[in-house]
Image (cartoon, rainbow, N blue to C red):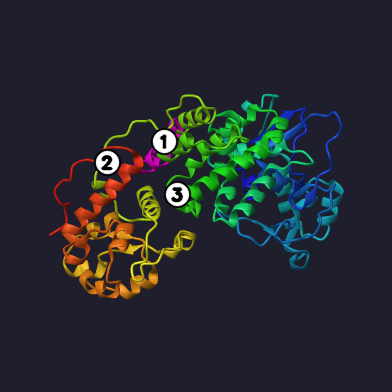
Amino acid sequence: MDSLYKQYPVGSILLWRTGSRLKSENRLGAFELPPPQKDYPVDYVLDGQQRLTSVFTTFQRSLAPSSEDPDTWLPIYYDFAAEEDAQDSRFVALTSESMEVRRYFPLSSFFDPVEFSTATRDLTTDQHREIVHVQQRFLTTLLPVQTFETEDRATVAIVFERVNRMGIPLNTYQLLTAWTWSDEFDLQQRFEDLADEFEEFGFQDVGDDVDLMMRCCAAALQNDPSPTSLVEMHGGAVRNQFPQVEEAIRRSVDFLRTNFHVRHIRFLPYSALLIPLTAFFFVNQARPVTGDQHEELTLWFWRCCFFHRYSGNPQRNIKRDILEAVKLRQGEPSTLATFGIGPLDFDYFTDNVFNFRTVATKTHILLLASLRPLTFMSGSQVMLDDVLAEPNRREYHHCYPRAYLMQNSFDDRLINCLANYAIISRSENRDIGGRAPSEYRTLMPADTTSIQRSALLPDSLFEDNYSKFIVERADLLATAACLLCDVPKMPMKTPPEGSD
């Protein structure tokens, strides 16, 4: 209201006129809008809904609000006592109890001559002159409106996406929800139901990530990771096939949990890995996955993770992998796991610092989990369902304690490199404290062979020689990674910089 009064630019309203009836919001602020007239074209708001809501709720006199709820709607008043200022507003939202008749004037009366005349009856001459001037500002102000008419939904989606690129991020999702809606089907509700279903398995974020869900749907239905590809489909086609999409997402989640111990979406190096998997499991759902298909998917997964396939701008790689995943599922020749990769060396585990937000760290944790590690102190099986259920639990710690290495003047980056991390529970880490490995060795079983093998720990762990340990551990990890990725390993080089 203040911007309109001061004649500041407020932007234009963008409307889309169509004969189609879509799912839409029929509430505007605190008001329930009547249904549109039969056989009359409808204008859907693509941009400017908040501005329209503000203007409508302030000035309309036809509909009564459901309630005077401060959280949703309050009448707007002009404040005679406010100072004229380029920044501060002379307009306030007040409850009926807070309104002082001689100080505040209701804007709702501006477009009703009789009500306006009644409201000015008790004003002073100066106040009357002032409010008439304010009213004239609003009566003569025009809101710029652009209306375009088309039945081409792809065009509408592009326009909507462009005008909202700095605003609402759900663009295509909102359009698709409207286009696919029926009394029996609500896309938004189906995604929410999936989120609830996956919560038990630590994958609630999958259902909550609307963009990811849209990309999975597009991959399954259109073999394209772009959600805009869905707008070309008929709403009924999306509704009819959506149960198969849901089942494909379920199988993808189960595949990740069963084969890679991914117990929470945050442990997945790339959430986008779900997209080609969904395309794969969408096809031929009645057929079991063959051994060759399982092997190809597993190889593709590890290669994507260790060689950071989906970093940067991965759209082209994701689309290519979708097409190859579909070929694989259909029993056709597929190159899903064949893409440009090179040898892997132990630098991967010495140059990358442990940081749970990075792809390298999440990949490292899944590599350790694949070895089915044993606990440090008792040698019993680590309960991966507990360790990997929640990222915040931090059940992975330094093999050579940080405090011990700092006392020996090691470089901080080398102290925190991946090669110095293993799955060690918090309680065990407290027992280890800042002791040298040769000291905390006394807390472990007499024979640590199985423990070392399950975590790829060389004997140099207990020699208190970190420079030697870090090279040998990194080499063991690189060897295991190369086996998973089926790639050659680079020859061992000199110890990494930062060791003494």
Q: Callout 3: few (<14), some (14-19), or many (20+) C-alpha neighbours within 10 Å?
A: some
Label 3 residue SS? helix
Residue 175 place in picture, x, y as percent = 66, 36
Q: CA distance from mark 1 to mark 3?
A: 25 Å
Residue 86 appears in the picture as rendered? no
* Amino acid on which the number 3 mark rests in the picture: Phe
Q: Name the N-terminal-most of marks 2 and 1.
A: 1
Disc 2 packing (10 Å; few <14; some 14–19; many ≥20)? some
Mark earlier in primary sequence (1, 3): 3
Residue tagged by mark 2? 344
Q: Residue furthest front?
A: 447
- Identify the amino acid type marked 2: Leu
Q: Dividing the picture into quarters, in which one does residue 286 lie?
A: top right
Marks 2/3: CA distance?
A: 20 Å
Residue 66 appears in the picture as rendered:
yes
For label 1, the SS is: loop
The answer to whether marks 2 and 1 mark residues whose Cβ atoms lie closer than 8 Å is no
- The image quarter in which residue 228 lies: top right
**Label 2, label 1: how many angstroms apart (C-alpha)?**
22 Å
- Magenta span has 98? no
Residue type marked 1 = Asn
Question: What residue did someone put label 1 on?
Answer: 313
Give the residue at mark 3. Answer: 260
Binning the other alpha carbons within 10 Å of mark 1 as few (below 14), some (14 to 19) or many (20 upward) gives: few
The answer to which of 443 and 358 lies nearer the viewer is: 443
Span colored in magenta: 301-317
Which residue is at a point 50% across and 51% down the rendered structure image? 265
Labels 2 and 3 touching (C-beta < 8 A) = no
